[in-house]
Amino acid sequence: MTALYVRRVAAAAPASGPPVLLVHGLASRGRVDWPDAEWARPVSAAGRDVLVVDLPAHGRSDRPPAPLSAADIVDLLSEVVDDAGGGVDVVGYSLGARLAWSLAARGAVRRAVLGGLEPVDLLRRVDLEAARTAIAGGPEPTDPLTQAVARMVRLPGLDPEAVLDLVQGIAADPFDPRADPPQIPVLLLAGVDDPVVRGLEGLAAVLPDARILRVPGDHLTALHTPQFRAAACEFLGL
């Protein structure tokens, strides 16, 4: 059975709110997107338990026996929330933000910070055959998006085939933000130089309580800026 690896950091001060769940992006890991010095330590010091997950086929989580849909992964995240007592605040980045959107729509989330969220479903545009050819030693894809994904899945510490299987499963489960938007306060964070997040206003328009804030950086760097962390912590009441 597929399970998520979860690293729990206990609150270092009297409880001030629900646990904070941190969900990383594609081809990353919990400890890469959410370094302790930037997230676990200050959040814990503010009186919150911290839950840092590794998504399937990433980090210390299992490699699924078959491609998982986005809904399947959200089911796994829901299990993490249930194990934590049934309610969390969530911070997600890129793919993690897309999954956190769906998790928040299920009602187990009090507040959500969604960074680098792609208003369009980019993974559906990946040429999986070309990406698999590249990781097997063949020519690099000519399509820039597919080329970028093929390079990402070959980063150290990843199983490229398993991550591409994950892309396949998620791409088969299209992201439609209008179908079931979260009914909670949501902060949409984006780097000012991030072309992936064009159209955030459309996402905000389907939410009953949304704010948009742009911080320095592009899709790779915005997450690690002090402005991103400060905005997320302020929104969550830390």
Image: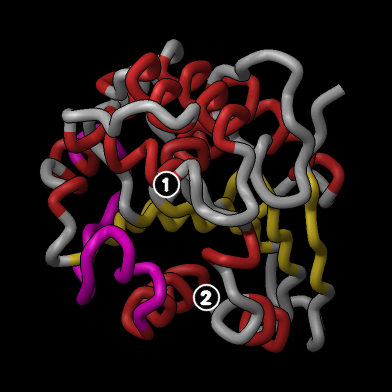
What SS does tag 2 mark? Answer: loop
For the residue marked with disc 1, what is the amino acid?
Met
User: In which quadrant is the C terminus drawn?
Assistant: bottom right
What SS does tag 1 mark? Answer: helix
For the residue marked with disc 2, what is the amino acid?
Gly
Relative to 64, is 107 above or below?
below
Residue 197 point in image, percent of width and height: 20, 48
Residues packed near mark 1 inside 10 Å, few (<14), some (14 to 19) or many (20 plus) = some
Relative to 18, is 62 above or below?
above
Q: In percent of the image, x 41 and y 18: which residue is there? A: 171
Question: Which span is picked out in magenta?
Answer: 205-225
Q: Which residue is mark 2?
A: 237
Pick the front one: 16 or 65 = 65
Left or right of residue 181, residue 96 in this image: right
Q: Which residue is mark 1?
A: 152
Q: Disc 2 and disc 1: Cα gap in Å?
A: 34 Å
Relative to 27, is 52 above or below?
below
Left or right of residue 187, residue 196 in this image: left
Q: In percent of the image, x 79 and y 88: which residue is there? A: 13
Pick the front one: 69 or 237 = 69
| The quadrant where residue 3 appears | top right
Q: In percent of the image, x 30 and y 29: which residue is there? A: 139
Residue 67 point in image, percent of width and height: 61, 16
Residue 15 point in image, percent of width and height: 78, 77
